[in-house]
Amino acid sequence: MPKNAGTLVHEAEQVGWDVRTERRWTGRLWVRAAVLSGLVMVRAGVEETEHVCAWNEATGKLVASASTGGFKAVREAVRDVRVVSREQEATGRTVWGRDAAEWVRQMDEAAAKVSAALSDARDAFNALDGSTPTGARAVKLGSAAYAEAKTAERSATDAVEAARAWLAETNGEDARGCASWRRAIVLAGQHAKEAGEAIADAGARAEREALAALIIEEAQERLNVQEVRWRGRLAESGGEASAAGYGGLIGMFEGSSRAWCAWFDGHTDYDGVAHAGHGDPSLSFVAQYDAWAHSKRSSQSVYYPARYTSAALIAGDRADAAAVAFTLAVVDRIEGSGAERLRQAAATVRKNPEGFGTSNERKHLASWARYPHSSFGEPTRVAEHAHAEWAALQNAVAAYKGVQDFEHALHWDMHYAVERDNARTDAARSGQAGLDEACADREKSGQTAEAWATAVERLAAARVRVHDAVVLASGDVERAQECGGRVREGDALAGDVWSAVRSCVEAYDAVARAKRDAAHYTESAQTYRDAGVLADYVAECARLEDAAVRAEAGREETLNLYGCAFADAATAVENRHEGGLR
C-alpha cells in the first residue's frame, strides 16, 4: 500500500470510517482500491456515503477515474465530515448522529425562538388600534392569529418538557424519546412565525377588505339590476322566469346548468326516486343561485357567493386598467431589455384608446406593472413620475386582494387553521408514540439483557456440573482400578472385583461422551451469543444441562461400581490373610 493510501486509511479508521481494501480489474490493469464508507449527518437524517481511491497494483501510483478520487481529495472529505456510529444509531443512543443531550439543547434553542416569535406577535397585536371599524376588524383578525401563536408556543413548551424528562429518566443513554418531538418543535416554530406575519398584516388586510366591501356591494347591485332587467324583458315578451332562463342569462356551462335546473325544479334520479325542487320563480334568483351553490359545498368543493365572483372580476378589470394607465404614464422612462416592446405596445394602445383589437398589448402593459420582471425594470423606480396613477394602481390592487381576503375569510382561513391544528396534534401524538416506543424498546432490551444474563448463568452452571462430574468419575475409575490391582487371581472374589472395574470404566465412557457433547454445545452457544440469537442460545443451554444430567448419572454409576469393587477387594484381601494364618 502506498504511503499516501496508508496514511489515509489510518486517519479514516481513527475517526470511525469503515475501511476495506479490494482488488479490482479496470479493463486494462489490476488496481488496489481503498473503500471508505460510513453514515454521515445530513439536514434531515443520516445517509450512507462512500469514498474510493485506487492505485496501480504494480507501480503504486494513483489511478483516477470517474468513480474514484485522489488521495488528497478523499483525505479532506474524510477529515471534514462527522461520521455517525452505526452501533449507536442501531441501539438508539443517537438519532441522526445526535445524542439525547444534543437533541434537548437544539430543542431548547428552537423553543426559545418560538417564544421570541410569540413575544413579537404579542407586541404587534397590542399595537393594533380597534377604535375604528377597520381597526376593529384588524383586532379580530389579529386575535385569531395571536391565539394560534400561543397554542403553537404551548405545544413547543410541552415537547421540550417531555424531551427533558426523557433525558433525565434515561440519563442521556437513549436519544429516541427526545428526537421523536422534533416535528412538534418545527411545526410550532413555523406556525408561530406565520401567526406573527398574519398579525403584522392584519391592519393592511382590514383596509383591503374595506376597499373590497364597496366593490362587493356594487357587484351585488349589478346582479340584482341584471335580474330585474331580465324579468322586465320576460314580462314584455310574455315569458316566465325559470331556472334554465337564468342559467342562460349568466352563461352557465351545460353540466352546471342541468344540475342547477334539477335542484330548482326537482328531478327523478336513476333509481326512480323523485326529488322535490327547492326553487321559487317569484323569489330572487341571485339568492337562490347562492343557496344552490352552497348546497354543493363539500371537502372537495369550495363555495363562493355570486357577488364575490362578480366582485373579483370587477376588481381585476379595474386593477388591469389602472396598471395600463400607470404604464402609459411612465413608459418613456422604463429601461431594460423589454422596454422597446413596452413602448410599441403603448403606441398601439394610444392609437386605439377604446381597446378594440388591443387586448394583447393592454395585457402586456398591465403585466409589467402588476407582475414586474427584472428584465423589464421595476415599476417602483419610476413611480415618482406618476404619483396619481401609481396611487390608483395600489388602491386597485389592494381592492382586488381584498376580495380574495373575503374569500379566504369565508373558507380558507378556517380550513388552513384546522390543518395547522391537526398537524400540531398529529406531531404531538407522533412524539408521544415515539417516546412510548422507545420506552417499550428499553424495557424489552432490559428484559432481553436479563434473559441473556440468566441464560449465561445457566450455561456456566451446567458446564461446572459437567466438569465436576468428569473429575469425580475419573477419580472413581482410578480408585476402582487400584482396587482391581489389590486382588490376586486365586482370590475368591477376584472376578467380581475385576468385573466391577470394567463396568466402572464403561460407565466413565458415558461421562466422557457427555463431556464431548458439552464442549460442542458450549461452542455452539458462543456462536449464537456472538450473533445475538437468544432463543438458540437458550436451546444450547438446555442441551448442555441435559449433558450435565447424563454426566452426573454416569458419575453416580461409577461411584456405585467403585464401592462394589472396594468392598469385594477388601473382602478378598481379608480372606487371603485369614487363609495364610491357618
Image (tube, grey):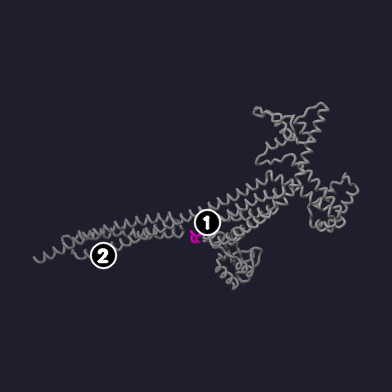
Magenta region, residue range: 160-176
The image shows residue 375 at horizontal and vertical percentages of 80, 57
Task: Indicate whether 1 appears above or below 118.
Answer: below
- Foreground pick, 86 / 424: 424
Q: Give neighbour class at mark 1: few <14, some 14-19, many 20+ (Cα, 10 Å).
A: many
Spatial CA distance of label 2 from label 1 is 64 Å
Which type of secondary structure does the marked residue at label 2 adopt? helix
Task: Indicate whether 474 appears above or below 234.
Answer: below
The image shows residue 527 at horizontal and vertical percentages of 44, 59
Number of numbered tags placed on the structure image: 2
- Foreground pick, 438 / 250: 250
Residue 247 part of the magenta-drawn span: no
* Disc assigned to residue 478: 2
- Foreground pick, 491 / 67: 67
Q: Is residue 543 left or right of residue 6?
A: left
Which type of secondary structure does the marked residue at label 1 adopt? helix
Amino acid bearing label 2? Glu
Q: Is residue 391 left or right of residue 438?
A: right
Q: Is residue 199 left or right of residue 564?
A: right
